[in-house]
Amino acid sequence: MPVLRLDEVHAGMAEVVGGKAANLGELIEAGFRVPPGFVITTEVYGEVCQVDDLLDDLPGSAGHIRERICGTPLPAELVSAITGAHAELGSGPVAVRSSATAEDLPHASFAGQQDTFLNVVGTEELLSAVRRCWASSWSDRAVSYRAANGVEHASVRLAVVVQRMVDAHAAGVLFTANPVTGDRSECVIDANTGLGESVVSGSVTPDHFVVSGSRVTTRLGDKPTSVRPAEGGGVRTVGQDSEVASVSEEQARELAELGRAVAEHYGAPQDVEWAIGADGVWLTQSRPITTLFPLPTQVEEGLRLYFSVNVAQGVYRPLTPMGAATTGLLATGVLRELGLRAPGGRPRPLRTVDGWLFLDITGTTRNRIGRAVLPRMLAAAEARSGRVYESLLEDPRFAPDRGVPWRVLGALARFLARNRLPLALAAVLRDPARAREEAFRRVDQLRADLAAPEPRTARERLDAARDALLRVTAPRMAWVAPRMMPILLLGRLLPTLVRASESEIHAALSGIPHNITTEMDLELWALAQHTGPDVGDLATRYRDRALPAEVLFGLDDFLARHGHRTATEIDVGVPRWSEDPAPVLAAVQSYARTGGAGHDAAQRYRRSADEAEVVVSEIVSRLPNRLHARVAEFLLDRVRGLAGMRELPKYCAILGIASAREHLRAIGEELHAQRAVLDPDDVFFLDYEELSKTVDGADQRDLIAERRATHERELRRKHLPRLLLSDGTEPETTMTQAVSEKSLRGTSASAGTVTGVARVIRDPAGAHLDVGEVLVAPSTDPGWTPLFLSAAGLVMEMGGPNSHGATVARECGIPAVVGVPDATARITDGQTITVHGATGTVDL
């Protein structure tokens, strides 16, 4: 049947009627008021519009496709079916609307990508509108949108929805959650008089209503015109008094109530289109709001505050389910080793949603210690997060408890006593060389323990993966981390303690020794200089073993010692360099080119260290008090001698994660051979308990497919909140940000000023950076650092002065500004920018 009545459509028919039609049919079935109509199914589109021969030439052939569709006569039986269905509607004015099979996807709404024709009058105009609606599937904007969202052109079919026109007094759009702040408790309405075309097309600034409970906040828009049905068909634009509200507050409350009912029906926030006619409110469409960030599952009651672990770790992409489970398991082990409770098999504050990790930090706002300490800790790790957190402390919903926080003080005292941290810190400060020696000895022992004989069965491997994290890695992390963190905090206090500016301290902490990641990068640089700039295709020659022996064995040795690393390395589901050495080989090739051009990263590092010594001497020499000068010299020496070890706790974690990955990969291969999973990597889309059931014979393939789809959707997400409230609000969106078209402001991370060409890179794999270019990135982890040796400067959206990127930038002696909101969007690739590392600004 080529034509279906709209009230006969159900959700399961999406493949033959498209997203919008299926949605409208479901709304009718659920009892919502939807204008009556009919649907011309997608099979008819494919039969009438034969365009497959032109698809290979897209986007250039889009115009030819539209011409063919509009010029193809409709079959007589289809014309008869359409006119008959139109007669059942009363043969009056109708709206002709597109309904594509690719609409309302979890990651892309396709809103407005195909055309709608309003107030279509007469049979001939209706038939013409149907063909033009089909043709709009090949508009330039629709073709581009599909390409940008990874939707195959050949997979899309388009049905046409024909509905009776509503002669609307007012119409518009309703969001059942605030699309700007993310607040799920607010409904946001944009409205104008007449048809909704003026609102959805953006031709006027509509009236704006925010409904929170029974409270309505109104902001009248500049809406000098309204779209109305024209006599004889089509629409016309008429003038109106923009000072008169398009809907009343009572109508806004009614619309909000309707929107909440629709959202409850779908179980998710909705983007609803509506119209108010003489006979009441009509729903004309509903689709999910695809831009809202998913919310962690709330355990405690009341409003909660979450901090992004991804932001703290410089990971700007979702973790695989096994990656999130591994992080939780490792954190559990560390907390237990430190004597902190971790009930339920994971740290109590850890929350996971669709691969994004958050910490519930609500409790820190309830006592004076947390309110005083956490902003400074956040500022050191991720500068913008510290400012956002401080802005929340004035919110009465996070008012602190009265009285002395004895519970917090008691827990802190027990923690310090159990781990003997005051004595340990004193020992570290007294003899930093011995502390370094002991720390690296424990890292070597960790390597040896993880290299134990491999188990044989999948069950044994699963136990070995857990043991690698809980029993082998966690104890080393629990020993190293508490001894390193006070040094980092001491580094943050240096400007006050030694009476120096931030820029002087940044300079004094340049060229820091004993950083295991920086040493790795310099080692790779040295290897590249032996390779030479004319090596050709290094990846192919390495694969074919067609390189000079010195280079070949050098690469083998590097990968043997550092192959457990990669970008996004905290995710056990991500391949290591040992599995895919392409990023390492690309870095070597880039280093060889830049070294051949006269740039010497190793020399720049040594120069930074020499300059730091000069700055330290200047700081100490100008202090008038001899005792103060000796204390300052002692503190600067200790921070320089120990700060490079900041990487060791995470380095231990990555060793453990890489070991667990080896076991999990072997399990995946075994399950794949047994046809229990479709792909060996499917194991990374389960957690440990789910994988255990799979090893025992459970069929988890449907769950894996669902998890993969979620992961693919979240990989497309372009925005990650630093802090998130449990009602969906992103606090950063409510802060007033002083922005300029020519200057961006962030946080100083490494002193110096440089002007260069911006290279915006969102993924380091295979990325190339020429000497003199400024690296602009969302965030960085150690997998990014090979790029630092070529960079002239660094700009990051995330991060703070103690973040990985900031530390390595100082060690490499390059100016850096971190915590710059939307840097990768506001800075254009190839644009000339000036990075002022000392002031934390970037001039465009």
Image: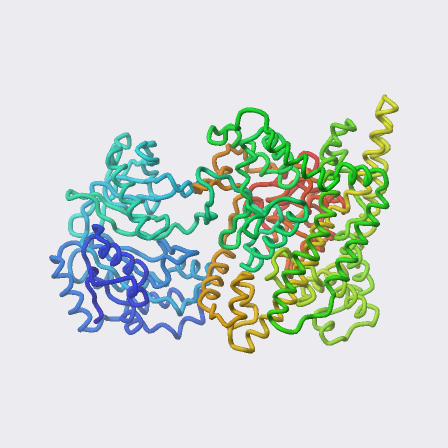
Q: Residue at x 57, y 30 (%)?
A: 367
Quarter holding the N terminus?
Answer: bottom left
Image coordinates for residue 437, horizontal then vertical, percent: 84, 50
Task: Single out the residue that lies furthest toward the top.
Answer: 624
Q: How is the image coloured?
A: rainbow
Image coordinates for residue 609, horizontal then vertical, percent: 83, 43
Image coordinates for residue 84, horizontal then vertical, percent: 13, 65
Count numbered badges in the picture. 0
In the figure, residue 424 lies in which quadrant?
top right
Q: Nearer the viewer, residue 439 or 269?
A: 439
Residue 127 as seen in the image, left or right of residue 638: left
Quarter holding the C terminus?
Answer: top right
Q: Residue at x 80, y 64 (%)?
A: 532
Q: Nearer the viewer, residue 33 or 744?
A: 33
Image coordinates for residue 755, horizontal then vertical, percent: 69, 43
Residue 844 as seen in the image, left or right of residue 521: left
Residue 45 visible within the image: yes
Q: Nearer the viewer, residue 762 or 138?
A: 762
Residue 743 visible within the image: no
In the figure, residue 365 lies in which quadrant?
top right
Residue 15 as seen in the image, left or right of residue 752: left
